[in-house]
Image (spheres, grey):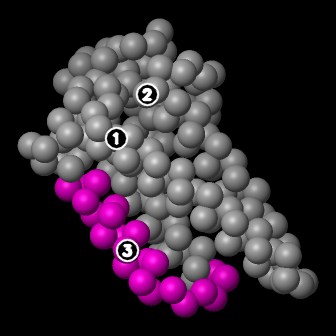
């Protein structure tokens, strides 16, 4: 169940990235951007919860804190206060619409970066002490989380006006 919710959050983000690249309508792009950031807002908490359950870590305060932070960004994304998170979307690059960040977006970016770093460290630390099948499983998780975090950051760099190849459409 947790794995399915985690994959759903990733799917919302990836489908949103792809759809934002296809649309020519600003109104549609704004709607898609909300869906995209909905997936991205809940992904850190779901992902951390998922990896904790796989590894067997029991850190309920960490999980609850991440869900609370994710919930705040989720509410910001759909509320009239969205202007504190994302101001608008514009057709900034030849291949897509992209969000215009507000102050809250930079906090969100730092949150994603911190949580992604946490995932990678936790998985790697547990990989080093694991043996057998669990070690192999953690190796694959480490590679997947590293690649996923990298492609997420490539997308987010576009918002910061740092042009990257359109890899977000192919993840």
Furthest residue to the top? 94
Badge number at residue 65: 3
Of the residues under marks 1 and 2, which one precedes in the sequence? 1
Q: Position of residue 138 (x, y in %)?
A: 77, 72
Say above or below: 66 vs 35: below
Secondary structure of the magenta portion, mostly? Answer: helix
Residue in view at x 70 percent, y 53 percent: 146
For residue 140, say whether it is visible.
yes
Give the structural element (helix, strand or loop) at label 2: helix
Pointer 1 with pointer 2, Cβ within 8 A: yes
Residue 58: within the magenta?
yes
Specify the segment rendered in magenta. Answer: 54-75
Q: Position of residue 157 (x, y in %)?
A: 52, 30
Of the residues under marks 3 and 2, which one precedes in the sequence? 3
Q: Quadrant of residue 22?
A: top left
Return the residue nearer the eye: 49 or 26. 49
Residue carrying label 2: 159
Of the residues under marks 3 and 1, which one precedes in the sequence? 3
Return the residue nearer the eye: 95 or 98. 98
Q: Residues within 10 Å of mark 1 (few under 14, many from 20)?
A: many
Q: Position of residue 35 (x, y in %)?
A: 31, 44
Badge number at residue 105: 1
For residue 1, say whether it is visible.
no
Say above or below: 45 vs 82: below
């Amino acid at each position: 169940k947790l794995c399915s919710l985690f994959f759903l959050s990733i799917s919302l983000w990836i489908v949103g990235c792809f759809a934002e690249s296809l649309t020519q309508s600003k109104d549609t792009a704004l709607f898609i951007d909300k869906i995209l950031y909905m997936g991205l807002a809940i992904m850190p908490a779901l992902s951390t919860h998922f990896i904790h359950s796989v590894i067997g870590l029991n850190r309920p305060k960490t999980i609850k804190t991440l869900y609370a932070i994710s919930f705040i960004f989720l509410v910001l994304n759909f509320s009239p206060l969205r202007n504190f998170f994302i101001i608008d979307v514009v057709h900034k690059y030849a291949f897509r619409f992209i969000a215009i960040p507000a102050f809250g977006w930079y906090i969100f970016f730092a949150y994603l970066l911190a949580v992604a770093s946490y995932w990678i460290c936790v998985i790697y630390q547990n990989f080093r002490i694991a043996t057998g099948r669990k070690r192999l499983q953690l190796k694959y998780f480490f590679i997947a989380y590293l690649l996923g975090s990298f492609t997420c950051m490539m997308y987010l760099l576009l918002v910061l006006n740092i042009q990257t190849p359109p890899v977000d459409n192919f993840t």
